[in-house]
Image (cartoon, helix red, strand yellow):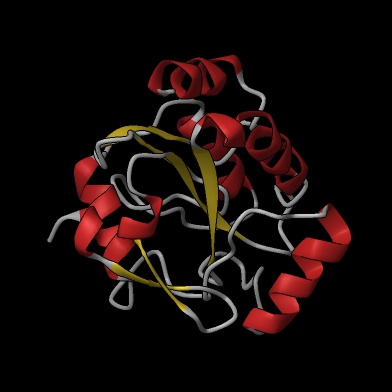
Amino acid sequence: MAISDIALTRGDGSADSFAAHKGKVLLIVNVASQCGLTPQYSGLQALYDKYKDRGFEVLGFPANDFGAQEPGTDAEIATFCETSFNVTFPIFAKASVVGAEKQPLYAELVEAAPTKQGDAEGFREKLRGFGMTPNPDPEVLWNFEKFLIGRDGEVIARFAPTTAPDDADLIKAIEAAL
């Protein structure tokens, strides 16, 4: 299955598809409201604001897979994003990004880009230090992992959760894709 063939559901229950985003550069991020990385929402919104007029979109996919850090309903998640971070980019329905219940989008993303850029190993060690067993590669490591999709619908790059939205390598990759 190609990424472009995958049906999507917005957080409000409305249908969406990659066809609606065709020809745009996309940053797909699995998000969570109660994570130490949650402040990245501000940076993601700043990226969206800076580049949206050039054909760039951030797509947020809430998941409760890591430390139960996204326990809310889709409506609660939307309210949190709007009131806490003034998020205006699309937030989709909560779904798993790992394991047996992994949504088809993430199955395709991980297959297309099995390797992360950024300090995944350092973050993996931090998780072990907290007594957690991190997912092995190529699985999604944690909340706020980022996949950059080109205008042609192909995965260009994948970034570790700790890669901040203002990271020079991420910005360079976005600008090159635009």
Image quadrant assignment for residue 86: bottom right
Residue at x-position 53% and y-position 29%: 54
Measured from the top left, where is residue 74 in percent x and y? 63, 80
Depth order, front residue of 146/18: 18
Residue at x-position 47% and y-position 57%: 133
Depth order, front residue of 173/125: 173
Q: Quadrant of the C terminus?
A: top left
Against 100, is 149 above or below? above
Q: Is residue 72 something that shows in the picture? A: no
Against 72, is 67 above or below? above
- Most distant residue in the right direction: 83
- Most distant residue in the left direction: 1
Looking at the image, residue 32 sits to the left or right of residue 142; the answer is right
Against 125, is 132 above or below? below
Residue at x-position 73% and y-position 52%: 38
Q: Is residue 3 something that shows in the picture? A: yes
Image quadrant assignment for residue 4: bottom left
Looking at the image, residue 157 sits to the left or right of residue 26; the answer is left
Measured from the top left, where is residue 92 in percent x and y? 53, 69
Residue at x-position 70% and y-position 47%: 37
Q: Quadrant of the N terminus?
A: bottom left
Measured from the top left, where is residue 11 in percent x and y? 57, 76
Against 85, is 173 above or below? above
Looking at the image, residue 6 sits to the left or right of residue 133; the answer is left
